[in-house]
């Protein structure tokens, strides 16, 4: 990490050396970057640093910074009084190098000055243990975040999907990606092998990317080839400490460079306030709908009836759009009686690579989020629950007519209440209220895929900590949903529920099975049944 960079100018005498205002700001060379050097009170200065690999932009910026560091031999990092640091304590008395074995202990820089022997920067550091270390060498120190006391905050990379079959590419799998610095189309091994064996691979890839793509330009890659996603940094304009964007609740890249930022400690103890450009609007400012009000009021009543005290929960429908799902179930062969019957019934059928498929089902996609302020309502606001649904109304053809599909449901363990342990009470209340809403609108069936995610699969809250990454086992998750449905049944919201085997025990054709966009069942049906078996099929297992 680089707190700041100084040119290798003649060094002043140690007695004359003093902490300079803004010395900890990240400074670049004017002749190369044209940035102005700002003072501690503000001005046009660079207060943000990109984490290596945090994004493509951050990756290139880090590479440029590394090149600049090697190009200027005499530049050194400068730590400022007030900076949070980790000090290295070697395991062997003769070795003080940070590269040797040992441990890092947190502290705060009290005084920064230059050594009388060699002119190198040294520091007096007050350790968190209460002991003050004098004249600590610069190579034993590294700057850390003032909140989490770590130098690098790494994130789990976002999920990666094959752009042909839309299946998740697990972190332990190899995959194929279009060559180039900016990356491009990604394919799983199966889709790449299938395309490679055809003569139309380039045409199919060009249709996927909407530009010219050649399969010969693809390279096989592994997890180690993916960039590392690391949090960026921001500096407080009052106490000059550096913090990770996440730790500082910093708004992000869309903020002006000359906008002053004050850390949470300075806002609490020194009366500083954030400018409006850095303030994040609360969830209450999001538009309220009839559905969100019903879910929110129902949850409030449910918590009160259960004797649970908690900070208010805000529920909002943040996405509500009309979509079309083009779903191709295992099709009958062209020219067969089943193909003729499908065309006669008015389904939109198209010949694609010699197969019949492509029925279109209109639906409305909604995203429902739940928020709560931490620390009894005085802390930061956190989104702890998310649900994506697909509503196929009366205008949708069979078999999807008047059906609802809960496509994604995810949560993180941040809901706070007194007593604790009522997260399921909240989630069940939202689900039951939503089922009641869909019944009132005339929907007949609701479908939920009850299967915990596989190891390495994340959908909505993918960048969770290790403590949060503990999904339920299949049977426990099944019982969890049964508990919710029993509550809905007791309130006369649900008449009955069962498995796919119970519902479609006597089906005569694959066309009777409702398929939803992105549903696991849409993927499972083709693997269980072949088109030749359509006229003689038993219930799916």
Image (cartoon, grey):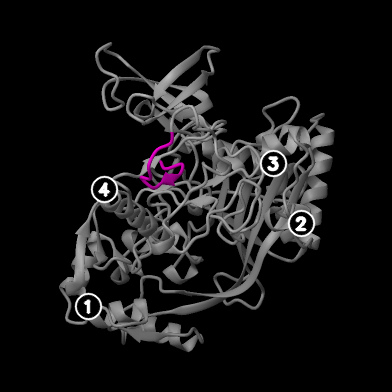
Identify the disc placed on residue 292: 2
- Residue 10 shown in magenta: yes
Could you say where residue 220 lies in the image, as x and y percent from the top left? 20, 59
Determine the residue positioned at 51% across, 41% down. 24
SS at circle 3 = loop
**Cβ–Cβ under 8 Å for marks 1 and 2:** no
Dot placed on the residue nearer the N-terminal end, 4 or 3: 4
Q: Magenta stretch: give its range.
A: 1-12
Q: Main secondary structure of the magenta part?
A: loop
Which of discs 1 and 4 lies nearer the camera? The answer is 4
Alpha-carbon neighbours of circle 4 within 10 Å: few (<14), some, or many (≥20)?
A: few
Dot placed on the residue nearer the N-terminal end, 1 or 4: 1
Dot placed on the residue nearer the N-terminal end, 3 or 1: 1
SS at circle 2 = helix
| 215 and 451: which is toward the camera | 215
Task: Look at mark 1 in the image and give the residue it sits on.
Answer: 214
- Residue 258 shown in magenta: no
Identify the disc placed on residue 224: 4
Alpha-carbon neighbours of circle 3 within 10 Å: few (<14), some, or many (≥20)?
A: few
């Amino acid at each position: 990490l680089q707190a700041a960079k100084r040119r290798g100018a003649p060094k002043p005498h140690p007695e004359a050396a003093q902490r300079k205002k803004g010395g900890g700001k990240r400074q670049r060379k004017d002749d190369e970057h044209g940035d102005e050097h700002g003072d501690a009170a503000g001005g046009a200065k660079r207060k943000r640093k990109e984490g290596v690999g945090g994004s493509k932009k951050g990756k290139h910026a880090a590479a440029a910074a590394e090149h600049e560091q090697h190009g200027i031999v005499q530049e050194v990092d400068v730590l400022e009084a007030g900076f949070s640091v980790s000090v290295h304590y070697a395991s062997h008395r003769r070795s003080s190098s940070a590269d040797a074995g040992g441990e890092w202990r947190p502290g705060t820089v009290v005084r920064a000055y230059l050594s009388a022997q060699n002119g190198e920067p040294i520091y007096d550091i007050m350790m968190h243990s209460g002991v003050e270390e004098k004249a600590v060498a610069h190579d034993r120190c590294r700057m850390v975040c003032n909140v989490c006391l770590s130098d690098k905050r790494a994130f789990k990379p976002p999920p990666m999907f094959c752009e042909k079959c839309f299946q998740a590419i697990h972190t332990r799998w190899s995959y194929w990606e279009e060559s180039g610095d900016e990356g491009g189309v990604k394919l799983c091994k199966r889709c790449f092998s299938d395309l490679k064996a055809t003569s139309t691979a380039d045409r199919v890839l060009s249709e996927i990317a909407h530009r010219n793509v050649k399969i010969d330009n693809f390279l096989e890659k592994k997890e180690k080839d993916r960039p590392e996603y690391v949090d960026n940094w921001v500096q407080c304009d009052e106490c000059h400490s550096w913090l990770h964007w996440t730790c500082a609740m910093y708004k992000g890249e869309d903020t002006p460079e000359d906008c002053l930022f004050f850390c949470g400690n300075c806002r609490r103890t020194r009366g500083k306030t954030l400018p409006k450009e850095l303030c994040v609007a609360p969830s209450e400012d999001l538009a309220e709908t009839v559905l969100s009000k019903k879910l929110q009021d129902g949850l409030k009543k449910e918590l009160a009836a259960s004797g649970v005290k908690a900070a208010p929960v805000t529920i909002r429908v943040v996405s509500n759009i009309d979509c079309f799902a083009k779903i191709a179930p295992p099709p009958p062969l062209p020219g067969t009686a089943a193909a003729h019957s499908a065309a006669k019934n008015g389904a939109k059928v198209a010949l694609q690579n010699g197969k019949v498929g492509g029925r279109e089902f209109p639906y409305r996609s909604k995203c429902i989020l739940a928020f709560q302020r931490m620390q009894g309502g005085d802390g930061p606001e956190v989104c702890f629950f998310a649900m994506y649904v697909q509503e196929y109304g009366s205008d949708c053809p069979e078999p999807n007519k008047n059906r609802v599909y809960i496509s994604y449901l995810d949560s993180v363990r941040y809901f706070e209440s007194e007593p604790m342990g009522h997260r399921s009470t909240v989630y069940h209340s939202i689900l039951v209220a939503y089922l009641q809403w869909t019944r009132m609108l005339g929907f007949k069936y609701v479908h939920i895929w009850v299967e915990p995610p596989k190891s390495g699969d994340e959908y909505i809250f993918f960048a969770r900590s290790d403590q949060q990454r503990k999904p339920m086992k299949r049977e426990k998750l099944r019982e969890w949903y049964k508990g919710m449905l029993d509550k809905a049944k007791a309130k006369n919201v649900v008449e009955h529920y069962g498995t796919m085997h119970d519902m479609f025990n006597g089906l005569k054709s694959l066309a009777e099975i409702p398929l939803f966009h992105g549903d696991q069942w849409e993927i499972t049906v083709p693997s269980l049944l072949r088109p030749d078996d359509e006229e003689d099929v038993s219930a799916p297992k």
